[in-house]
Image: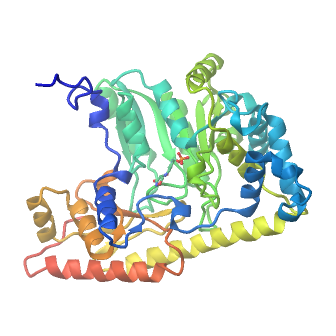
Amino acid sequence: MAPKKVLAPDTINGNIKKMVYAVRGELYIRASELQKQGKKIIFTNVGNPHALGQKPLTFSRQVIALCQAPFLMDDPNADIFFPADAIARAKQYLSYTSGGLGAYSDSRGLPGIRKDVADFLMRRDGYPSDPELIFLTDGASKGVAQLLNLLIRDEKDGVLCPIPQYPLYSATIQLVGGTLVPYYLSEEAGWGLDVQDLKRQVVEARMKGITVRGLVFINPGNPTGQCLSEANLRELIQFCHEEHIVMLADEVYQLNIYQDERPFVSAKKVMMDMGPPYSREVELVSFHTVSKGFWGECGQRGAYLELTNIHPKTVDELYKVASIALSPNVPGQIFVGLMVNPPKPGEISYPRYSEESKAILESLRRRARIMTDGFNSCRNITCNFTEGAMYSFPKIKLPQAAIAAAKQTGKAPDVFYCLKLLEATGISTVPGSGFGQKEGTFHLRTTILPSEDQMPEVMRLFKNFNDNFMSQYEGPSGALSKL
Ligand code: DCS
C-alpha cells in the first residue's frame, strides 16, 4: 500500500480546511460545469467588469503598452499611434524604475508611484499624506491579508466585521486563525450602521475572552451597496477611539456612487476634520484598488494601502513582511499611478478619458436603477437601492414549502433557490449565506455588471423564474418565512 500522503486532506493546515469563500463556491462550480456542457451562463457572481464586456480606458492601455514595449517609442511613427501625453507618461513611469517593468521594485512599490498616490490623497482629502506610509499591493486583497496577519495573534483576537460582509474578511480571519466578531447592518435602515449594536457586540465578545483589535467597514458596501454618511463615519471613529480598535477602511468602491445625497468621503478626511485626539490617535488603514471604479482592471492586480497613526516600528514590520514577496507586480503599480493621476483638462487625452469614464459610470448608475426596480417588481422580493459599489442584495421571502424542500436536499434555503435560478436561467449569483445574513432571512447577491442592453432580458428571466418558483412553493399551505 502506498504510504499516506504528507499533504493528506486531513493533515493540512486546519484553518484552510475550515475556510469558506462563497464568491467562487458551490454556485460558481456548478455554473462552470453547466457552461462546459454548453449552457449559456451569465456570470453575475463576481465584480469583474471586463469579463462582462466593459472596455478598458484607452489612455491607460496606451501608457502600459509603451511601458511594456519601450522600443515602440523609438519608432518614427510612434506619434501616429500614441498621443504625445501617453508617450510622456510612459517615459515618466519608466524613469521611476531602474530596469523597466521587468525589474523588481521596492517591496512597498515604486517610490515615484507612492508619491503620486500621496499627492492624490492630498488633493482628495485636503490633508498631507506621506509616501513612506503608502504600500502598493497586488490587489487590495493582498493588502487586507497582510494587515489581518499583522493584527491577529491567535484565536482570542477578534475583528469586527459587518454582516453581510465581503467574504475576503471572514476567509482571511479564518486563515490567520483569528475570530470574526459580527456586527449587523440594518436592512430596514438602508443597510445603515448602528453603533449601539457595535458596542453590544464588543461587550459580548469580551465576555467570551476575545480581545477586539480591529474593525472592518466597507464604504460603499459590498454586498449591500450603501454609502455611509459623514455622521456615521464620525460615530465609527469615536467608537474605535473609545474602544482602542484599529480601523480597516475598505474604500475600493469610492468611485462607484449612484446617488447625489451622500458623495464618497474618506475615513481619513473625516478623522482629520475631527481634529485631536482622533486625528492623532485613531489607527487607520485605508484600501483602494484599480479593480473597481470605472477602471475595472481586476486582472492587473494593482492597489494601495495607506497607514495613518500606525507605530513607526510596526510600519517597519509590515515592510519586512512585504519584502518576503520581494515586489508587488510592477504593471499593476503603473495602473495605480494612472488611477491616481488620470489625464487632466487641457491635455490631449483628456476628452477621450473623460468621455469613456463618464459613459461607464452613467451606465452603471442606470443599471443600478434597472436592477433594483426589477427586483422590487418580483413576488416576495424587496431590495434596497444600490447607492454605490457594484451589487444588488435583494431579500427573498421564501415559502415554508421551499425551505422544507431545501432541507430535504441538504442545502441551505438560499443556496437551493440560487441553484434553481442557475439551472433555469443560467444566471450565476451568490447566496446571501456566503456573506452572512440575519437568521431567518434569505438573500442573494448579483452584480449590476451585465451590459445595459442585456439587462432587461436578465431581469425578465429572473422575474419569470422567481414568480414561477413562488407559485410552485406557495401552495395553500405554503406560508412565507417570517422575516
Ligand atoms: N474589498 C472589497 C469590498 C471587494 O469587493 C473586493 C473585490 C476587494 C476588496 C478586493 O479587490 P482586489 O483584490 O481586486 O483589489 N470584490 C470581489 C467581489 O465581491 N466580487 O468580485 C471581486
Q: Could you say where residue 398 lies in the image, as x and y percent from the top left? A: 21, 69
Residue visible at 31% across and 33% down in the picture: 16
The residue at the point 11 percent across, 60 percent down is: 409
Residue 384 is drawn in which quadrant? bottom left
Where residue 54 sits: x, y (%)?
59, 67
Outermost residue, top side: 313
Judging depth in this view, the residue of 116 and 209 nearest the camera is 116
Q: Quadrant of residue 349?
A: bottom right
Using the rendered image of the protein, determine whether residue 375 is visible from the camera's viewpoint. Answer: yes
Asked whether 54 or 157 is in front, the reply is: 54
Please count the marks in the image.
0
Residue 202 lies in quadrant = top left
Q: Position of residue 115 (x, y in %)?
A: 78, 36
Q: Is residue 417 above or below residue 228?
A: below
The answer to whether residue 5 is above or below residue 349 is above
Q: Quadrant of the N terminus?
A: top left
- Residue at 17 percent across and 71 percent down: it is 399
Coloration mode: rainbow
* Image quarter hosting the C terminus: bottom left
Residue 199 seen in the figure: no
